[in-house]
Image (cartoon, grey):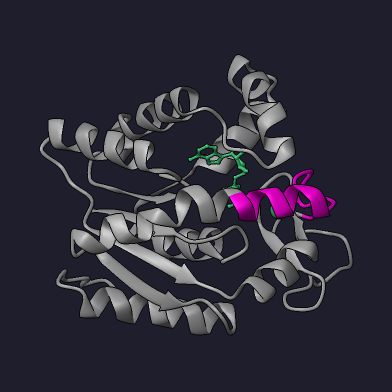
């Protein structure tokens, strides 16, 4: 089972994708996390991606596609995966479709999490993340139990370097120009499920589960 989470930066894709992956026992592949890990480990990939990420630009397709397809080809993804942050433009979506077809696989559903621009800005500008386990926090919506520390692993929370006003603006621009057209692309294949992304994390989670239930697939474990 292959599910894509689609939505703007700040829509809550990462949070929902991680939860669903746990519930369905599928691998969660977040392209942004893969890049951030590579950056932290100072690998060649990290060095290549750094300047693009800091500016809020897309990392070139060649690099991104290779990284995600490599991750998808490992044995733990054999029975499926949840993709979050990829594909982010038409070229990536088409390449992914082709790669899956070659393995007699296909995307099952695309969950599009819809959030207003105003809410996206509010969320991104007050976002904090755990550098060790990637858990996200928000100053007022979902503060950590102890100020500045991760609930799960006690690491010191950080601002993402691309959560500056300037980079946020760029990421949203890139999203509307390049990623939003994928809504149509997947709608045409009948795979798109639109979910209202405003409200609490749990409200959105329930909407995601119910959208998947009402989709044609059977999700026995949910
Ligand atoms: P967000 O969705 O909050 O913008 P991500 O963590 O998904 O953040 O991605 C962070 C950055 O990593 C992006 O701004 C971009 O530079 C890079 N990136 C992630 N996924 C892709 C992708 N599919 N194609 C190109 N660049 C990507
Ligand atoms: Zn943590």
Identify which residue, 151 or 90, lies in the foreground. Answer: 90
Residue 11 is one of the magenta-drawn residues? no
Residue beneath the point at 72% across and 53% down: 168
Report the side of 149 relative to 189 (left or right).
right
Which quadrant of the frame does ligand 1 lie within?
Answer: top right
Q: In this view of the protein, can residue 56 be seen by the observer?
A: yes
Residue beneath the point at 74% across and 37% down: 54
Identify which residue, 119 or 83, lies in the foreground. Answer: 119
Report the side of 193 relative to 33 (left or right).
left
Residue 155 is one of the magenta-drawn residues? yes
Which residue occupies the extreme top position in the image?
A: 44
Q: Looking at the picture, how far across and down is residue 70, in whole percent? A: 37, 26
- Specify the quadrant of the image occupied by residue 153: bottom right
Report the side of 101 relative to 37 (left or right).
left
Image quadrant for the C terminus? bottom left
- Specify the quadrant of the image occupied by residue 210: bottom left
Q: Is residue 169 above or below residue 120?
A: above
Which residue occupies the extreme right position in the image?
A: 147
Identify which residue, 192 or 102, lies in the foreground. Answer: 192
Q: Looking at the picture, how far across and down is residue 173, in whole percent? A: 62, 52
Residue beneath the point at 53% across and 81% down: 202
Q: Is residue 150 above or below residue 43?
A: below
Q: Is residue 198 above or below residue 172?
A: below
Q: Looking at the picture, how far across and down is residue 163, in whole percent? A: 77, 52
Q: Which residues are the magenta region?
A: 154-173
Identify which residue, 139 or 92, lies in the foreground. Answer: 92
Residue beneath the point at 40% across and 55% down: 181
Q: Looking at the picture, how far across and down is residue 88, in whole percent? A: 45, 45
């Amino acid at each position: 089972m292959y599910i894509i989470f689609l939505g703007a930066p700040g829509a809550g894709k990462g949070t929902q994708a991680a939860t669903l992956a746990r519930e369905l026992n599928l691998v969660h592949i977040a392209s942004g996390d893969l890049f951030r890990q590579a950056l932290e480990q100072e690998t060649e990939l990290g060095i290549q991606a750094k300047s693009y990420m800091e500016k809020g630009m897309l990392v070139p397709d060649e690099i991104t596609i290779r990284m995600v397809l490599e991750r998808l080809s490992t044995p733990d993804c054999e029975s499926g995966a949840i993709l979050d942050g990829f594909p982010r433009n038409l070229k990536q979506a088409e390449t992914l479709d082709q790669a899956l077809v070659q393995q007699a696989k296909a995307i099952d559903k695309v969950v599009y999490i819809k959030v207003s621009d105003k809410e996206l800005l509010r969320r991104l500008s007050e976002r904090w993340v755990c550098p060790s386990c990637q858990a996200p926090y928000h100053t007022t919506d979902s503060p950590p139990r102890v100020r500045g520390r991760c609930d799960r692993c006690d690491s010191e929370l950080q601002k993402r370097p691309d959560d500056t006003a300037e980079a946020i603006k760029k990421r949203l621009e890139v999203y509307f120009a390049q990623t939003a057209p994928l809504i149509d692309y997947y709608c045409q294949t009948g795979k798109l499920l639109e979910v209202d992304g405003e409200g609490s994390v749990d409200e959105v989670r329930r909407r995601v589960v119910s959208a998947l239930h009402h989709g044609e697939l059977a999700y026995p474990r949910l």
